[in-house]
Amino acid sequence: MTGKILVYITLFASLSSTIFYLIAANKGGVFQKIARLSYYALTASIVMVSMYLLSEILSHNFQYTYIWEYSSKELPHNLLTATFYAGQEGSFLLWGLLLTLIGYFLMPYVQKYDYENYVMGFYSLILVFITVILALKSPFEYVWESFPNIPVGHLPENGRGLNPILQNYWITIHPPILFAGYSAMSVPFAFAMAALAKRDYRNWMNVSMPWLLFATGILGFGIMLGGFWAYETLGWGGFWAWDPVENSSLIPWLIAVALVHTMLVSKKTGGLLKTNIFLAIFAFVAVLYATFLTRSGVLGDSSVHSFVSPGQTVYNLLLIMMLTFIVLSTVGLFMRLRDMPNPKSSFKMNSKEFGLSIGSVIILLIAFIVLLGTSWPILLPLLGMEKSVIEPQMYDQFNLPLAIVLLFLNSSILYFNWKRNDTNTLLKKTFPALIFGVFAAIVSSFLGINKAQDMLLVFAAFFSLFINFSFVAKTISKSPSLVGAYVAHVGIGLLILGALFSGAYEVKEQIRLEQGQEAKFLDYTIKFEDKEQIERHWQDREKYRYNFKITKGDESFYVHPIVYWSDFNKREAPFFEPGIHTYASKDLYFSPYSIETKYKHPPIVVSKNMKTNVTIDTNYSLQLLKFIMPGPESFSGSQIKFGSYVRISGKDFVIEDTLYTLIDQESGFNIPVWKTFAEAGFDVGFMQLDVDKENLGESKAVYAFRQIGGVMERPYEIFTLEASSKPLILLVWFGTILIALGFFFSIYKYVKSNNKIKLAMKKSEEEEILVANTSIDATE
Amino acid sequence: MNNRYLIGGVVILLFVAIAIYSFNDKKVGYSDIETASTSGETVQVSGIWLKEMQTEYNSIDNIFTFHIKDDNGTETKVIYEGAKPNNFELADKIVVKGKFQEGHFQASQILTKCPSKYEGKEEDVYKS
């Protein structure tokens, strides 16, 4: 009850905060105070909801369906904590919590800039929707509420536990960061709505810019962590598969990146006012769309990610939430369309603003391609056409030329001046970079780059890297706060290079190895040495670390793919983790495909009267004549002695005898009583009884063989894996980190310049832009 | 309206049109087994895995063979040149992409719909 009551308090507080903030926008005074109090109450209650859920998880209260479904007593603390958001209900709570906390810090910020009522009003409205979802799809539902036949008050002994694929440290890092990015993306939206309401079409950009940069930086980082998780642990082979889940988080990020650039144009030229408001709204709607795609079950058939249908309620709620915000913002935008100033801003072709705008258009085109491709399976049925999906290669095909142009722009533009330029000087300035790019492309052709478009991409990437590097070098000592953009651009260049080389120029090969065997891959010799069991203290799993020795010339090292059997799927099939060896220039990546267990002379499974060859010596055959039901004398302790009467036939003799197996009732293990057939020259063991409950006569027996007095043959394993070499994959991770860092550096720059804007707030608009101009950009 | 914007607009529209056209050209449609077996087109078919039928990964040739049944109840053998997907046995639904060839469905891709969340069932509450 406590949890549910707290959720309703949260819902009430968010409603109250929304309503009173929006009233306060006109009436001010006491309403604003009520609104603030409501927001504090909201913060307190959602923190309490979260603490409550967490404490119930930590104390294993499996009476709650949510906790029962995702956690178990065996999980270590960090993973147990992560089960907080392992399912739908909890991840909505996490989203709500992060939104609220960000809002808590947003409030004093917007107070300084006189933006509080509208921004916090619209911001709280988002929270209303999230808390409604939490109220209707509650993590605090009892098992007897979820399942009608469970008696009230039943406490399951243990939970179902967390999917083994999710059981690693990534689940503690990736989702919170991604949700922080999603949450932060709401701030520019709230600002844009406030701008429309206040008819202030310029100032909101300066004020919201640091938040936009924060949102973009953290969302980008979160997305890439997901990619790294897929690569490092899940063994998907790459970091990006153009899967709907990945795509849907990429779309808001791309829009936000475009917005960062169009806002910059706006500040400098006073133009693109409508564009910016539109993009801020669009980025947020894309976040909602991403949630809708991944949480509504709508993409059920098109993704390797699983989407369990969450039920009609969540589907409807998410759809209503998305549509509400689309309608609200569209109406707002149209109401103000005529009111918005339409500054004369015909950008000259060779001006910085023009280049930046084109760059933004290209980023938006990429976003459009991803959006269109991801929505394709939903879009067609809506248009009355047959459902179909897009091949992932389509994304590469479309984005490659766009990436080339983008890299060319994000560098050469830095030499452009605002307003107008002389083409000759530009050529002169970019000349060294051009040479460098051409040189790099030629070198790359010797390294195996063989397609014209790929060479163009290499050229563009090195061109961009050269210029952006030199700008980093130029500014870092003079004005370090300006370095962010260049660092991010360097990151993009490295990321694209890494993606090209590791994706299009990887070498892969399937390898099949028995224990002790060797195989060749490129110049490497791979030897399957042995395995060792790890995490032995766990009862619910059998996890093996395999030791593969890789040798090349004098150098040798080990990689350790992991094979993992879990109770989670009743140990029916193993889970795999790849083994990776990282060089500066490439990764060697070993992704397990299958593990087979074989015997040279396998045990046989027979039903009654069936005659089967003895595997250790096929001159003989074995026939099961009958089972001997255990009598009272067969029981000793926990063991039952169970017999089977068999006939062993050779060319010139037949022996019949009874073989026994000891079934331990406690452990369920069978221990064979080996019997020697001296004439035949081997021992036979009755290993196991496979009882057919429906037809006892169909029950089967398993027999194994060994040399007389010998040891039973141990099975050997055959490991099949995909070996691949992924050149320059390190650049992908390094590039991404630089991108995120670039955004964070830039926050500092805007916070600094905003302090000046605050001083200028009372001055006229023209003066204000002037201040911004002089304070922000020292590069020209 | 400036001429340049007009050109820009046309270029963007052209790009969008090309995107839609080629997406439509390269798309892979959904189908059922019966239609797919007669049309011979590359399609995407979803169904459930028939556990009791032959299911075998041949690691020497890297060929994975199994059988599925679609919503209409039609069954087919599926041959996939590649390893058995990681969570094949866990999947409650299998989506295969490919086309019919010599009486079986030759798959180029398998998507396994594995619930990363396994919906709990009532009997599990007692078991645990």
Image (tube, coloured by chain):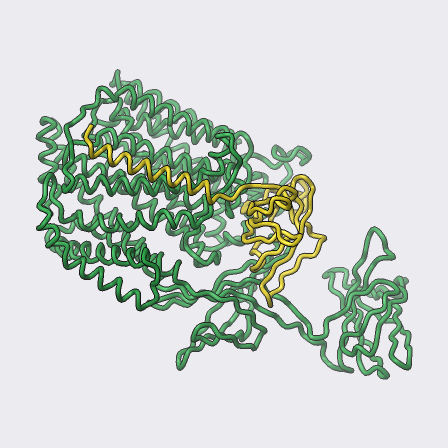
Q: Residue at x 38, y 52 (%)?
A: A225
Occupied quadrant, residue A690: bottom right
* Residue A649 locus on image (x, y percent): 88, 76
* Chain B image colour: yellow
Tell me residue A683's x, y (percent): 80, 78
Tell me where residue A774 sits by quadrant. Answer: top left
With A43 as the anchor, is A774 left or right in this view? left
Q: How many numbered discs sit on the rendered protein?
A: 0
| Closer to the camera in the image, A96 or A323 | A323
The residue lying furthest to the front in this view is B39
Q: Position of residue A39 (x, y in %)?
A: 34, 28
Q: Is residue B20 visible?
A: yes
| Foreground pick, A462 / A89 | A462
Residue A244 rendering spot, x and y as whole percentages: 45, 44
Q: In this rendering, does residue B114 appear at all?
A: no
Residue at 48% across, 68% down: A560
Asked if residue A425 lies left or right of residue A607, the reply is: left
Colour in which the image shows chain A? green
Residue drawn 83% across and 51% down?
Answer: A694
Seen from the viewer's position, the closer of residues A191 and A448 is A448
Rendered view: A16 above or below B78: above
